Amino acid sequence: MSDTGGNPKTDYSPGLEGVLAGESALCQVDEGASGLRYRGYAIGDLAEQASFEEVAYLLLLGRLPTRKELDDFSAQLRAQWVLPGPVEAFIGVVPPDAHPMDILRTGVSLLGMTDPDAADGSHEANVRKSIRLLAQIPVLIASAYRLGHAKRQVQPSADLNFSENLLYMLTDRQGDKTARAMARVLDVSLILYAEHEFNASTFAARVAASTLTDLHAAITAAIGTLKGPLHGGANEAVAAMLLEIKSRDRAERWVREALASKRRVMGFGHRVLKQGDPRSAIIQRQAEILSRTCGDTRWYEIATILDRTMQQEKGLYPNLDFYTAVAYLLMGIPRDLYTPAFVCSRIAGWGAHVIEQQDHNRLIRPRALYTGPPPQTYVPLAQRT
Ligand code: CMC
């Protein structure tokens, strides 16, 4: 401990910037040529060759599945699509203007109370709970959204994969060539969103998990944390910005004015990746291809102008949320479901982190640098003037 005012004798880093706050075997975040890896596998290889289900298996079960293991995993997901009665009832009474992230936060908390493994905090039960949430979250999001917008309810289909089902439930699209192209891009975005080391929401989940609370409590904390516009909420904010700019002629001026008035341009910058986000180049290429497939390059063109101007003016690069918003706009995903779609993927990373934390637990309890007044003498209430 310190010799000055009770402050601990450690280096202080606001926002924990650059601080190693724990160990993890899940994900390597590297700005260099090797980029990002999940359990040793390069994100470029996974985005190009794997499916999101494979990646979720890799994160939660520790290695890539065989064909049989993947089929069993998909069957396990399909078997858990149904929402428990209390969650269905909750969806029926949410305020009409509730944000889907808030519905999700409360819905996941409620799923924790109805989970068959609620009282079991073992490694195996945590894996089961994570797989269950992976299946339930898309259904919860879609059911609540469809009910709130007087749209007919749709059930996920056993003939569709994870991303095809998600696209179908969020947009009614399925089956044709364009829908298949959209689902593939959605799948790539889910692979890229699945895991990113000690980002704010994952860290929130690990802090909660380190008290040995239950997995659903930790995931509820993570969902609340992801909602913020400096984190997962950025993808919705990017789409709002593109819609506001509307046409490519206005893009450069818009961004220069935003910077002149010291506004943050959403979808740019990253706490760790100062030389660029390796995920961004992958999703940018996908957004460009999808724009051409859909015959609508407007959002992509506006985005590339913003991208170029931000690099010139601020030396800031797009993060994953930026071109993902272009792709989601093309897919017709309702804007306030972008961050919930992020949750559909990140639940794999969060679940894996909660399991890892509790397998090798040490309570996360850092110190604060005290900046308050010096010691004061207490004056009884009656004597205070
Ligand atoms: N637009 C304009 N200026 C920015 C931006 C931005 N998006 N990001 C950083 N800056 C500026 C900032 O104003 C500061 O400038 P100055 O030194 O002149 O005051 C400088 O860059 C450093 O910023 P910082 O806030 O110290 O950097 P940080 O590491 O704390 O911030 C960040 C990281 C992600 C919070 C920030 O870049 C940001 O607010 N970006 C916009 C929101 C966003 O896209 N979030 C998604 C993050 S990545 C994916 C995810 O987590 O979901």
Image (cartoon, helix red, strand yellow):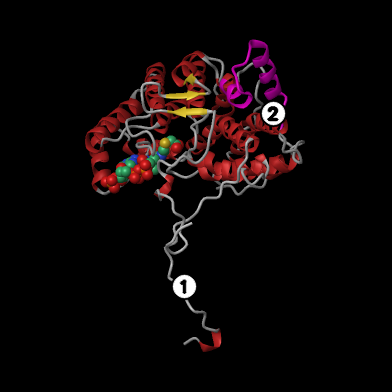
State the residue at coordinates (69%, 40%): 111
Q: Main secondary structure of the magenta part?
A: helix
Q: Secondary structure at mark 1?
A: loop
Q: Is residue 250 left or right of residue 378?
A: left
Residue 110 at x, y = what percent? 69, 44
Residue 157 placement: quadrant: top right
Q: Which mark is residue 375?
A: 1
Three-letter amino acid code at the position of disc 2: Trp
In the image, residue 103 above or below residue 69: below
Residue 281 placement: quadrant: top left
Residue 258 at x, y = what percent? 28, 44
Residue 206 placement: quadrant: top right
Q: Nearer the viewer, residue 273 or 147?
A: 273
Q: Secondary structure at mark 2?
A: loop
Q: Is residue 111 left or right of residue 277?
A: right
Instruction: Decide which of tag 1 and tag 2 comes sooner along the chain.
Output: 2
On whether residue 208 falls in the magenta region, the answer is: no
Q: Is residue 4 visible?
A: yes
Q: Nearer the viewer, residue 257 or 224?
A: 224
State the residue at coordinates (34%, 23%): 297
Distance in Å between CA atoms under marks 1 and 2: 57 Å
Q: Which residues are magenta?
A: 55-82
Residue identifier under label 2: 81
Three-letter amino acid code at the position of disc 1: Pro
Residue 164 at x, y = what percent? 57, 21
Please tell me how crowded label 1 is: few (under 14), some (14-19), or many (20+) other residues with Cα within 10 Å.
few
Quarter of image, ligand 1: top left
User: As drawn, which residue projects farthest toward the front?
Assistant: 3
In the image, residue 213 above or below residue 41: below
